[in-house]
Amino acid sequence: MLLSNGNRKSNKVNIKTKAGLDKLLVSLEEPVRKIEAAGLHFAYHNHDFEFAKLPDSDKIIYDILLEKCPNWKFIVDTYWMEFAGVDVIDYLNRIGAEKIG
């Protein structure tokens, strides 16, 4: 499955909507289980758009990922966090060192 930040029309999953993000999370359940069964960790790399509120929700994409994906590691790109205008130190503390991959 390919991801899209919603900038182009395609058959990719647009995670800039709650429905698209939910679809992504459901589609990743089985691959993540297989990765974990092999003794590895699934890791997610952020960009700036994950720090925007979803138009059909009052939540920020990254906050949903942190909430719904407790076993994931996060490859934190502080440049994109700063670019998005979020408090980088606050997010690093919220993520926690054990989840930064």
Image (cartoon, rainbow, N blue to C red):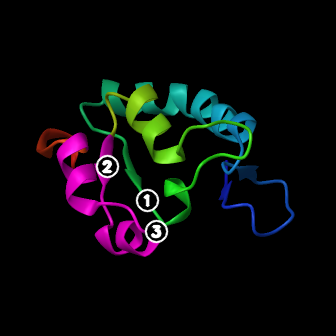
* Secondary-structure class at tag 3: helix
Per the image, the residue denoted by label 1 is: 46
Residue 6: image x %, image y %?
A: 74, 61
User: Is tag 2's residue or tag 1's residue first in the polypeptide sequence?
Assistant: 1
Q: Secondary structure at mark 1?
A: loop
Name the residue carrying label 2: 74
In terms of sequence position, does the residue under pointer 3 or pointer 2 come before the other? 2
Look at label 3 and name its amino acid.
Ala
Tag 2: amino acid = Phe
Front residue of 42/67: it is 67
Residue 65, numbered circle: none
Instruction: Say whether residue 80 is magenta.
Output: yes
Answer whether labels 2 and 1 touch (C-beta < 8 Å): yes
Q: Which residue is mark 3?
A: 84
> Position of 15 compared to 84: left or right?
right
Distance (Cα) linking label 2 and label 1: 8 Å
Among the 4 quarters of the image, the one containing residue 28 = top right
Q: Which residues are magenta?
A: 73-94
**Image quadrant in which you'd find residue 67:** top left
